[in-house]
Amino acid sequence: MRKLLFLLLPLFCLAQDLKLDHSYINEADFQVGDTITIKFNTIQITENVVPNLYVFDYEYNNKLLQKITHRFKVTDNESNTNAQVSLNHWDGYKYKVLNTYDENDLSAQYLNGWLNRTQVEGDTDSYPADNDWSVERITIQDGVGITYNNTLIEVDFKIKDKINTSYTNYNNVTHLNWMRAEDNSTSTQYDVDAMQQKITLADVEGGDAGSVTINLKTPNESPTHYKYNILNNSSSVATGYFDANYQAIVTGLENNVQYTINIEVDNELASDWLDDVATVTDVFLVFKEAIKAGSDPSGSTNTFTHGIQFLLGEVNNSGNVDFDDSYVLLSHIMNENVSEWFTSSTNGAKNVWGEKNQYGYSTNEYYFGQRKDFTPTDANKVFDFGHGLIGDVDFSHSFEPIVKENTPIARGVVQSSSENLNLDISTSLVNDKVELIVELKKEDLAGMQFVIQFDDTLLEFEEVQFNTGNLLTNFATERNNKLYFGSISVENTENIKTGKPYKIIFNPKQAITNTSGLIYFQTTDAVTDEGTKVILKIQ
Amino acid sequence: MKKLLILLLFISCSETIYIENRIQEVPESLFMPQPTGLKLESYIVKDKVRINTKLPSDGKYRIKILDFSNKIINQEIITGKEGDNILNIYVNSLPVSSYNVELYTNTNNFIGRQTFSMN
């Protein structure tokens, strides 16, 4: 019976007497790099329990927290000014909870999980190695009872970036392992439970965002000619070019920081195609919009189907789309540059861009939907940006806005995206002259445009013979070794005649055997009388 | 010995007959054993390159030059004759790149293809 009482005595004594708590004292709005302070204190549960010795272990994740310093606070309270304190530190270990006891039963974990762990069969190692964790042991002893509710110690940590770790969040970055609470004078040990055993830092923002992907949305076939510049508070933090997959993989950005991105065409790289952006289709569409001609004979019908076309078609900086804009574009395809406000090899690229889902849709914040900011987070590191070019109302080189649900489409002519047309263009040596002939079978073309480049060391341009119809505006301009020619039905009352509407004649400067390679078919474009872009495929 | 004398006598008395066939002189570099096809004199080209278009019959044919995306950037209609036709491809107006040259009948039946690169 006596033995039984001795056996039960520790159990009675180990009823819960106090709690050990630890918590951060900062506002819970953490950023990577912030310093947080964790305080430790005890809370009395049972009256007349006055331990004067505390020994406890806690551990912290050293991949997520970097210890800065610690301050014992127990001596700040009037009762324990003479307390002796000690802190020991080990890196590379983590406490292995003895599962036969509750994890939060700190005194049981002390007694069985640590002190007598070697007696646990098959589970003798209380502190196996673990490079992610560091252990600290705090010892406080005093001649009098250590007061409750007062802070025993504060430990400062810096929040580390988790980017190069195996951790995806800041859950359970600390852990109370065990505690010995004792009245030294009587060797009475008290039962200690954990109040908050683990600390989780929720919603830690900032930090290296890792690889952030910017997707360039454009139908252009030269994505590598597009460059980006990412800014933070007007300072550039990352620059580069998009790759052949229309992507930029950007590093060095931080999570939860808002960045601005500029996307521009490199004018030097793109010099070969900038003149192809605004073509006869654009001229035709702008002209139709200017006269408000559509399917409705009563007039005042929009041709444009997206609001952003009013931005792309405003090429003379007048503030609206009118006849002058169509004149500017018509001049351009005739190789006359009369405005600096649209995309061409002379003017350079005039860039428009915005986040894909906003691009094209004006709000009070975003002019024509040009939302240029993005914020990487743990959950989102991929951003899509649409890009357009002023002068390109047919979206041949520009991202066409996504039609939002419930977004009204302008009434009138709704352009289908495009259609294909096989076209026969060939050169021949005829009576010692080089002839280029365009053969056309399609009847509803309201505009055609060609840019050809010829070998001016061997050829001299003589003339263009038009057989397009009586009411069409024809044009042909030679500049350097290029010839710009075509037609447009500005009145939209007559289409280009079928047959052989264009014959170009060159005089050889020296004897030639044939004509292969002498003329390079650089640009071709056409538009129907309904405003549909026609992609010409030479057969 | 008698037989040999008779043979020599026959040879010395026979009339020599020359049959003249007009053929276009084809450089060895452009010679094609096939009955039809296309051959380039060089696959690295500067200024121009000679080609042999070996045609099945007299008539019109198409020589097409295609860029890397198979877009036709030049097309010539030639009037050729059966057999070898030595022509040129002039490349000064073309952007420096690699191109395919293709030979077709006038009705776009394929005959041959070659590739050249500019430097």
Image (spheres, coloured by chain):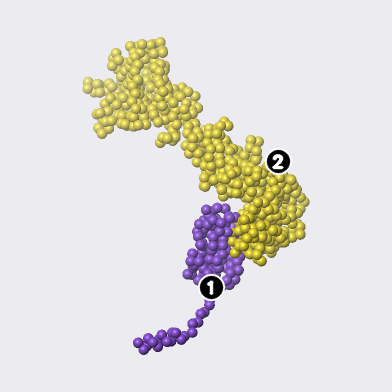
Chain colours: A yellow, B purple
Q: Position of residue A248 (x, y in %)?
A: 52, 42
Residue displayed at 38% across by 22% down = A20
Chain letter behind tag 1: B
Tell me if mark 2 has few (under 14), some (14-19) or many (20+) residues whose alpha carbon lies within 10 angstroms of its own.
some
- The foreground one among A457 and B12 is B12
Q: Amino acid at mark 1?
A: Ile
Chain letter behind tag 2: A
Q: Amino acid at mark 2?
A: Asn
Give the mark toward the camera: 2 or 1: 1
- The foreground one among A186 and A534 is A534
Which residue is tagged 2?
A: A317
Residue displayed at 49% across by 82% down = B16
Say whether residue A365 is left or right of residue A180.
right
Which residue is tagged 1?
A: B23
Per the rendering, the mark at residue A331 is none
Q: Position of residue A93 (x, y in %)?
A: 33, 29
